[in-house]
Image (cartoon, coloured by chain):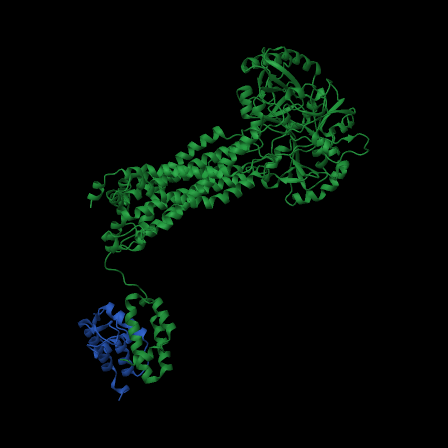
Amino acid sequence: MKGTYLGEFEEVVLLAVAIRTGDAYGAAVVNEIEQQLGRAVNLGAVHTALHRLEEKGLVKSELGGVTAERGGRRKRLYVVTVLGRRALEEVRQLRNQMWNTIPNIAWS
Amino acid sequence: MNQSQPNREKLPRWATWMLRRVCADHLLDEFEDDLNELFQQRVELLGVRKARLRYIRDVASLIRPSLMKQKTNQYPNPSHTDMLQNYLKIAWRNLRKNRAYAFINITGLALGIGCALLIFALVRFHYQTDRQHHNYERIYQFTSRFASPNGDFNIQGIPYPFGQAVRNDYPGIERIAMLEEWYSPLVAVPVANQADKKIKDKSHNGAFVEPAYFQIFDYTWLAGGPQDLSQPGTVVMSAEMARKCFGTTTNVIGRIVRLDARIQARIVGVFADYRDDTDLAYSIMASWSSLKEQMNVRPEDQPFDNTNGSTHCYALFNENFTAADWNQQLLSFVRKNNPKKVKATSYPAIPFSTMHLSPEYGGVSKGLLLSLMLIGLLLIGTASINFVNLATAQALNRAREVGVRKVLGSTKAQLFWQFMGETTVIVLVAVVLAVGIFRYGQTLAQTYLHGPFRFTFYFSSSVLGWMALLVVAVILLAGLYPALVVAGLRPVMALAGRLTTRQAGGFSLRRGLIVTQFAISQMLIIGLIVVANQLSYVQTKDLGFKKDAILTVSLPNLPAQDISKMRTFRNLATALPDVSQMSYSMGGPPQSGMSSQTMVRFDSRPNEEPYNPQQTWIDADYVGLYGLKLVAGRTLQPSDTAREALINETFMHRLGFTQPEDVVGKLLYKRDLAPMEIVGVLKDYNQSNLKERISPLFLTTLATGFYSASIQLRSNNYSRALTQLEKAYNQVYTDNFFEPSFVDDQIQQAYQQEQTMGSLINFFTGIALLIGCMGLYGLVLFMVVQRTKEVGVRKVLGASVTSILWMFSWEFIRLVGIAFVVSAPVAWWVMNNWLANFEYKISISPTIFVGALLATVVVALLTVSFQSVKAALMNPVKSLRSE
């Protein structure tokens, strides 16, 4: 767990996949991120991130069922693995830790 | 989602194209789908333009290395060589199953390739002659050109004082050397207390040469060198000659030999033996200054207008000096040295590299070499055609195998290479055989090819290169089409066994190929017949003089012949019972071409005649011995000096007379001779070979100029006559060598090049025919097997044996006819061109063509009938039963 470093964008992508569980594919993730963050995201960046996440074992992908809209081609659906979920929680925990360490005086 | 349709057109297509080119295959679909979906959404939200822009940005972002990596296969990829073992096994099995077919193919290819290699080596030999001298590009030879109203007359000969005249005046000429050829000199080696050891051989030629010659041409010296060759009485020889004389090449320097019984010479150098591919084949070379003893006058003091064909002049030009530069200065040179002949004579410089291939200077004609190359290519063509025919016919037998392979997943490319591979194996085996044939042919060539046309094989790396090129070309030519045909067989039809010959390789192509083969054979046969006819014509044509049972003996090569010795020899010879007549002359038989050109004055005309008549010396018995015919006047009276002359009809016409009686009695004037009275006019006879026209000629008695004795033998017992003559000769001419030669042999030799060409064409035509027949045989064999059932049915229905034979033969006869239509005009045109070389030629009669046609028909029928007879006699029960 300590070995898997999660980059910022990768974290965002991972979160988007988690949000869209069950229907998380390339275009859907793009839409989700754009919706949530409110800024334009390149498809290539997303796919690269998904690729890297899959390599690290934080997501896994499967070819989904046949749908009409893609001309009979199957979508590749991504799902967050247990490892991925743990990584997300760890990051969140680390952030919270840092937040808690901020002295009260600086922020009130 | 029908809305997606109209929007699809607004996609920037080029971006999609780029993506497809770059992206990994397994990811491509995903990306494209995502891109399209996003595009649709954005078109509705942001409009077309913004959607397109985002599309392009997305594509750009997808082009990155991590997404370009192709997915590696889980399963190991088969390499290209994995199937090799299987292919080889199948190829071997096939060869063993169809032995006849394999044998025909391999032998045909081996013959074709072997002969092609021979021809290429022969042609290369002639193109490489004398190329080994490192100054090759800059070496030139001076020649003499005489202009006459009939055209220019070029010879290699150069006047004796030429070298001296040129030597110092022209800075562009780096080195210049004169060389006088000396045909088979008599070399006598003094042996202590015994008679001299005499060596004389037709194959050993000598020369008188200036030392600069060795700076122009490359010679390797085993001992001594050419530096001392400027002194008179010195000689250099080849290692082989030294071994013949002394048995060794060491300690030869300083020893003495006597040349032609007159010149005493000291050996100053021994050079390494030269290879066969040179035209400068002189085993022994004496110093140029020794010529003085041969001719009794220094060469430099000889006049300029006396040109001897065996005197050559070689030069090494500077880098910047070319033949054109010399030719420009030619006019002033001739004016200075030979002022009287300025109009008619010139001495152009010819690059030495062109000499060997110029027939007018005694070299090999390029046309001949080119025709041989063509024949070589034809041979390869025939052999390849054979292969293609047989292979495509055999394709049907492999159909089932091909069908199975295709079903199991073989691609067309794999099948193609499999069959190309089989072709390669067959060709390689054939090449091994071909090398054997090549070596055999080489030894044959050594025995049968002589003179300028000789051939000796020297190995060099370019030969290997040629061979590799040839092999690759044959493999491609022969293997390409059959491999394509086989790879294209349709598996369903093949497996069901329902493929017909038409689908496998187009019968019309096979027909076309057979027609080509027949056409080639017919052209070669026609060529063969024409050449053979022309040769026999020139050899049996009545040349205008007798030639049977006459032999010539050469007299010593002296500047002035000894008259009393000649008289003695004549008395001895005519006393022999086998000798009926004898005559002395300058040059032996009338067609020897031994005469020299000169200028004369006629009668009361103040100026010399504007053309150069030939002159030759004969004695009073010459006309009688050779049976020359007089059209007017009488023959010469016996005399030792020039008093009377005979002229030939051509000369008479050139003088302007039509009636021979009008010219008899007039006087002929030539410098250095007394005025001669014309006492008779001879009917024209061929003074040289039949390629040339007859020149004007006058003959007179000048006994000191005789070099040959012509002896007519009475009986058939030549050996006895020869021994007795030899004894008589050696009695009179003790220091000379008795060298007899028969006149009809000499005539034959004049056509050596044509004869060689004739035999070469014979040989290769035979081979081409053989290859063609083998191919035909194989094809018929196949056809018979194919049509076994058809023959069986026909026989059952009552066909006779002859009708079955006819069924097979008719097909081929038709093809022969078509081939003839193609080949006859081509052959006629080519042969016409060749015959134009001859002044006296046969006309190409239609019988030659008919003969060629019949020959090919007969050969084709024989080949076909061999197998078809077997088919016709087969028991129909047997052939129909095997279902």
Q: Is residue B751 visible?
A: no
Quarter of the figure with residue B724: top right
Most extreme residue toward the front is B798
Q: Which residue does the image show at 68% across and 42% down from the upper left?
A: B172
In-image side of B538 versus B293 (left or right): left
Quarter of the figure with residue B264: top right
In-image side of B674 versus B686 (left or right): right
Most extreme residue toward the bottom is A108
Number of numbered labels in the structure image: 0
Q: Residue B734, image x and y in percent? A: 63, 13
Q: Residue B585, image x and y in percent? A: 67, 21
Q: Residue B176, image x and y in percent? A: 66, 36
Quarter of the figure with residue B424: top left
Please determine whether, in this image, residue B17 is positioned above or below residue B548: below
Q: Nearer the viewer, residue A8 or B419?
A: B419
Rendered green, the chain in question is B
Q: Is residue B510 visible?
A: yes
Please determine whether, in this image, residue B861 is positioned above or below residue B572: below
Most extreme residue toward the left is A82
Q: Nearer the viewer, residue B349 or B365?
A: B365
Please determine whether, in this image, residue B679 is positioned above or below residue B523: above
Q: Residue B419, image x and y in percent? A: 32, 48
Rendered blue, the chain in question is A
Quadrant that contains the N terminus of chain B? bottom left
